């Protein structure tokens, strides 16, 4: 309920900046003016106290000189009373029991509580400022209470005059603060209007426009630069998605076209059962390849959507051993030496099927691009005390040119830039390393590739230890 009224304020940033800045300015200025007024009041009262203190000393000198001879005391103090009559200055002298011993003729009747009648100090009563001190008489040595006082109307008038000027200044600030604050807030938020209008015009089909930078280096310039960077990344991402969709459509269209062509040719004339069986075998092979491609695309889509999660602990050394054992026959058939170096046991968090896909892709690539007589080595290392493990797959194949290294993890990218469906060294859909990267990053790891043309390639996979 305390801030319920704020809900009804205009929602614009300009108005809210003006509102809160005005509140802060008024509080600060009001506090400063009040502090100055109190400081002036304290100074004026201190001056009154200093004057009354001197008056008490004068009275004490008179009593020290004349003792309790009140006629002589009155004769000596009467000129001082008359000369300060415009200030209402007066003197009263009491015993310690509160009995009034002497008083100047102009002393007003002030109601002073009995508890304070003989207590030293300063206080205000009925427009008078009083000071009360105890002293010892010179002739007989009898303690006395001296009360001197003066009207404080001059102090009050000075304070009221100062208060009026301060109220006038506060009223002027009350009017000027919101007006100037609204103008300044408008200048401060003007670049925001440009940002809003330009971002409202942006469309995914046209992300070439960028926010202007004023060169001031302030937060709004930083916001514009940040939004421009986000637009750059968004444009790159959208272009990658368009390329991905186009390449996926191409990869899906090729087997479908081949299957349709085979069926159309088969329907042109009657064929023998053996020819039909051969045709069906080809169709099954094409369907298998098409199904694998679709599964790969779904896996990449899950990775982009953040749906690849670790579902348990996986013995990575066992997966590597079984994969190497499975590829050992292919390596021997191609005349390639496949060597494996494994620790006793390494456990990571992940999905067994996905991690097996990573290992198979890396071994398949290494064997595919390594010529006869070459060597492929798989090394799994887990240093003691380390929170990460490393899987290294090295080959002595043809390597990758330096200009192609930044593209190896792009989807549907192939070193020969072709789109031919073949099982040669340059074949494949170009999704293997992209799938590896999506899976490894989903499990909190990293994958990198280093290659030297003519000497071979090394792929390094880093995963957190379970």
Image (cartoon, grey):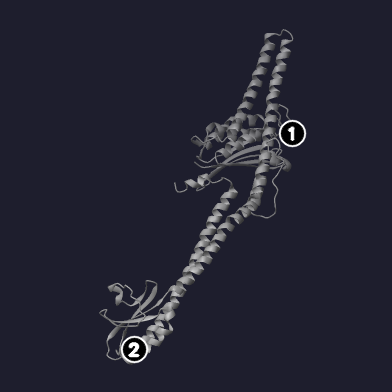
Instruction: Say whether residue 192 is visible.
Output: yes
Residue 417, disc: 1
Badge 1 density bin: few <14, some 14–19, many ≥20, Cα 10 Å: few
**Residue 464 or residue 169, whichever sits in front:** 169
Give percent across and percent down for residue 31. Answer: 49, 63
Q: Is residue 378 left or right of residue 131?
A: right
The tally of labels here is 2
Badge 2 density bin: few <14, some 14–19, many ≥20, Cα 10 Å: some
Instruction: Say whether residue 336 is visible.
Output: no
Q: Residue furthest top?
A: 270
Residue 45, disc: none
User: In the picture, residue 89 is in which quadrant?
Assistant: bottom left
- Residue ID at (69%, 36%): 239
Q: How many angstroms separate mark 1 from mark 2 (CA)?
A: 122 Å
Residue at disc 1, secondary structure: loop
Q: Are marks 1 and 2 in contact (CB under 8 Å)?
A: no
Give percent across and percent down for residue 195. Answer: 66, 45
User: In the picture, residue 65 is in which quadrant?
Assistant: bottom left
**Residue 8 or residue 348, whichever sits in front:** 8
Give percent across and percent down for residue 300. Answer: 61, 32
Residue highlighted by disc 2: 73
Mark found first going from the N terminus, 1 or 2: 2
User: In the picture, residue 365 is in which quadrant?
Assistant: top right
Please determine whether, in this image, residue 94 is positioned above or below residue 390. Answer: below
């Amino acid at each position: 309920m305390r801030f319920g009224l704020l809900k009804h304020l205009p929602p614009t940033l300009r108005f809210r900046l003006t509102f809160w800045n005005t509140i802060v300015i008024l509080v600060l200025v009001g506090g400063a003016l009040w502090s100055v007024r109190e400081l002036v009041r304290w100074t004026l009262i201190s001056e009154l106290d200093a004057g009354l203190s001197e008056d008490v000393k004068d009275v004490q000198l008179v009593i020290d000189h004349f003792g309790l001879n009140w006629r002589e005391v009155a004769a000596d103090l009467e000129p001082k009373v008359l000369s300060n009559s415009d200030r209402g200055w007066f003197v009263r002298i009491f015993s310690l029991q509160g009995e009034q011993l002497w008083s100047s003729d102009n002393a007003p009747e002030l109601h002073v509580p009995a508890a304070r009648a003989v207590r030293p100090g300063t206080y205000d009563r009925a427009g008078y400022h009083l000071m009360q001190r105890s002293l010892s008489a010179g002739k007989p040595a009898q303690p006395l209470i001296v009360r001197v006082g003066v009207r404080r109307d001059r102090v009050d008038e000075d304070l009221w005059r100062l208060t009026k000027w301060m109220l006038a200044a506060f009223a002027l600030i009350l009017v000027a603060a919101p007006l100037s604050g609204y103008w300044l807030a408008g200048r401060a938020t003007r670049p925001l209007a440009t940002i809003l209008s330009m971002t409202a015009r942006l469309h995914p089909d046209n992300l070439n426009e960028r926010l202007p930078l004023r060169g001031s280096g302030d937060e709004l310039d930083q916001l514009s630069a940040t939004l421009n960077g986000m637009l750059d990344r968004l444009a790159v991402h959208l272009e990658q998605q368009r390329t991905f969709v186009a390449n996926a459509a191409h990869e899906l269209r090729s087997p479908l076209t081949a299957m349709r062509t085979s069926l159309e040719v088969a329907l042109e004339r009657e064929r023998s059962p053996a020819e039909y069986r051969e045709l069906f075998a080809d169709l099954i092979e094409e369907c298998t390849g098409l199904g694998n491609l679709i599964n790969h695309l779904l896996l990449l889509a899950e990775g982009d959507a953040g749906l690849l999660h670790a579902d348990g602990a996986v013995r990575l050394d066992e997966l590597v051993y079984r994969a190497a054992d499975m590829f050992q026959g292919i390596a021997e058939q191609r005349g390639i030496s496949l060597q494996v170096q494994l620790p006793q046991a390494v456990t990571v968090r992940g999905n067994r099927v996905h991690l097996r896909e990573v290992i198979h892709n890396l071994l398949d690539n290494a064997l595919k691009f390594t010529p006869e007589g070459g060597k492929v080595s798989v090394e799994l290392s887990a240093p003691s005390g380390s929170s990460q493990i490393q899987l290294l797959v090295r080959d002595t194949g043809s390597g990758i040119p330096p200009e192609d290294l930044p593209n190896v993890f792009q989807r549907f990218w192939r070193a020969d830039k072709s789109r031919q469906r073949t099982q040669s060294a340059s074949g494949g859909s170009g999704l293997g390393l992209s799938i590896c990267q999506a899976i490894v990053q989903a499990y909190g790891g990293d994958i990198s590739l280093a290659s030297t043309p003519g000497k071979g390639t090394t792929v390094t996979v880093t995963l957190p230890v379970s």
